[in-house]
Image (spheres, rainbow, N blue to C red):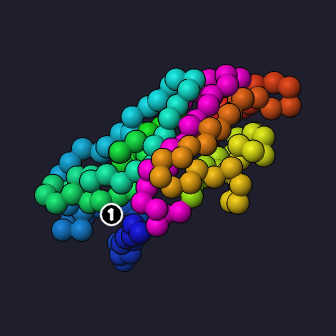
């Protein structure tokens, strides 16, 4: 889990920020996730070794072998299918996708006990219509 550091000083609000060791420069550029824009998308959940920092790699459970996983960007009102393939170790169990904020049928809303992608390469396909109340869904980050 990431930690947030808050520096509290007795200096007033107009004091210049201080440069100290807790504000060291980043050594690598920010990783921008790949953007997927197609109507039919496959997300494969699988282990991958990711170079988060220089040196040793970190084994992670990823989507499509990247961290962070990809961003899906689609126009409202356009149907999108997302095929979830479960290639994680069997100990990970079955998977589902839950999409906060979108309007989708119950089958495609990431139920915890149904419509699951079982381990061993099984897949579930979700359909997102991009529509709500007879019109295009509002554009949003979901
Ligand atoms: Cu939710």
Q: Secondary structure at mark 1?
A: loop
Q: Nearer the viewer, residue 24 or 61?
A: 61
Which residue is rendered at x = 61% and y = 42% of the image? 124
> Can you say which quadrant of the picture contains the N terminus?
bottom left
Is 40 inside the magenta-drawn segment? no
Q: Position of residue 92 (x, y in %)?
A: 48, 63
Q: Which quadrant would the C terminus be assigned to in this image?
A: top right
- Residue 42, horizontal then vertical, whole percent: 50, 35
> Relative to residue 134, is residue 122 drawn left or right?
left
Quick one: 26 or 39, which is closer to the camera?
39
Residue 81 part of the magenta-drawn span: yes
Tell me which residue sits at (27%, 52%) in the image.
Answer: 50
Q: Is residue 40 visible?
A: yes
The answer to whether residue 127 is above or below residue 22 is: above
Q: Position of residue 65 (x, y in %)?
A: 35, 45
Question: Which quarter of the figure has residue 29?
Answer: top left
Please state the extent of the stretch shown in magenta in the rendering.
73-93
Count numbered badges in the picture. Answer: 1
Residue drawn at 31 percent across, 43 percent down: 31
* Closest to the observer, 94 or 57: 94
Residue name at image x 67 percent, y 25 percent: 79
138 relative to 7, above or below: above
Q: Which residue is mark 1?
A: 15
């Amino acid at each position: 889990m990431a930690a947030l550091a808050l520096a509290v000083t007795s200096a007033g609000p107009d004091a210049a920020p201080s440069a100290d060791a807790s504000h060291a420069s980043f050594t690598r550029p920010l990783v921008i996730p790949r953007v997927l824009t197609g109507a039919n998308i496959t997300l494969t959940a699988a282990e991958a070794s990711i170079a988060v920092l220089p040196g040793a790699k970190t084994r992670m459970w990823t989507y499509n072998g990247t961290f962070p996983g990809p961003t899906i960007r689609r126009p409202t009102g356009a149907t999108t299918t997302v095929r979830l393939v479960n290639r994680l170790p069997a100990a990970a169990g079955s998977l589902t996708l839950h999409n906060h904020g979108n309007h989708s049928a119950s089958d495609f809303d990431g139920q915890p006990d149904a419509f699951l992608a079982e381990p061993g390469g099984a897949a579930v396909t979700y359909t997102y219509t991009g529509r709500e109340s007879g019109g295009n869904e509002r554009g949003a980050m979901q």
